[in-house]
Amino acid sequence: MRLVLDQVRQAFPSADGRGGQVEVLRGCSLATDDIRSLVLVGPSGGGKSTLLRILAGLDVPTSGQVSFDGTPLPRDARGRLAWRRTVGTVFQAYNLFPHLTALDNLLLPLVHVHRLTRAEAVRRVQEPLARFGLAEHAAKRPGQMSGGQKQRIAILRALVVEPSILFLDEPTSALDPEMTAEVLEMIRELRDQGRRLVLVTHQMRFAKKVADEIAFVADGVIEAHGQATAFFEMPATPRLAGFLETVLA
């Protein structure tokens, strides 16, 4: 995965009702090596999730350009829909349908978006359900599962469409430590299997283990970016050094 960001900006209407704009991203630029995993870290409100939504094709930047493997990310609605069908996105709030079983939540995108028959979809999800220890929960609805189980089902739902890249936005932020460990182990396994990931997380020690490269997003810009080991051992800016000192204390 080669990702290039060229002066990506994103502004939203101001909430004060005066018709102004709030600039959340103020010119994000980077170019990665050919990597499997990029992790976005930084203080809350710095722009990480906004940037991830742009990369996943959910939002269009106000200006600037994004490209993956030399191909610009589409800006038109049809092109972005086509892009979203080739990637998977997981949010912190699971986004499972509460009235459906775990199995039916997994089948939904395969049947209604990718047009598989139900029988074909069931065959596709059986192996990953077993591999990640979730087969026994297939008949449960979300209200009958733990937070860790729900998040792993949400990740699996993104995986069964066989995405080219998996985007994850703070997938453990709503979980207690034991459930967090379940989800992080699943993500680590996926990365080790060669899955391409872009991950937003506040779990710094996990980020160090799973990232090929890390970007520090603060105040709407990418203030530092580099290979994981150097990122932690030789912080590029005083602000990054202070951030790491705080979160790793």
Image: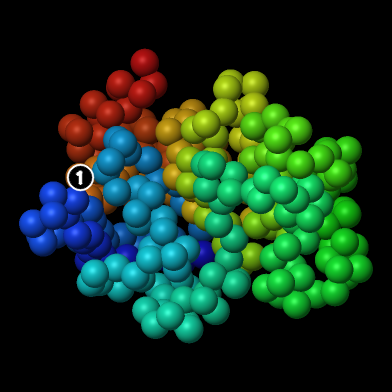
Secondary element under disc 1, as helix, strand or loop, is loop
Q: Position of residue 245 (x, y in %)?
A: 30, 22
In this view, the residue in front, 205 or 58, is: 58
Tell me if residue 225 comes above or below residue 119 in the rendering: above
The image quarter containing residue 8 is bottom left
Quadrant holding the C terminus: top left
**Residue 230 visible in the shown view:** yes
The residue lying at 14 percent from left, 59 percent from top is: 21
Q: Quadrant of residue 165?
A: bottom right
Q: Say which residue label 1 marks.
A: 219
In the image, 230 versus 138, the foreground residue is: 138
Q: Give residue 132's position: percent from left, percent from top.
A: 79, 42
Report the residue at 90% width, 63% height from top: 123
Is residue 224 shown left or right of residue 22?
A: right
Left or right: 3, with 241 as reference point: right
- Count numbered badges in the picture: 1
Please tell me in which quadrant of the rendered image residue 189 appears: top right
The picture places residue 129, in percent across and down from the top left corner, at 83, 48
Q: Nearer the viewer, residue 7 or 159?
A: 159
110 in relation to 131, above or below: below
User: Which class describes the residues within 10 Å of circle 1: few (<14), some (14-19), or many (20+)?
Assistant: some
Q: Is residue 112 above or below residue 212?
A: below
Q: How is the image coloured?
A: rainbow
Residue at 52 percent of width and 31 percent of height: 174
Q: Position of residue 83 (x, y in %)?
A: 52, 75
The amino acid at mark 1 is Asp
Q: Is residue 182 visible?
A: no
What residue is at 66 percent from the left and 32 percent from the top? 148
**Is 191 rendered above or below residue 27?**
above
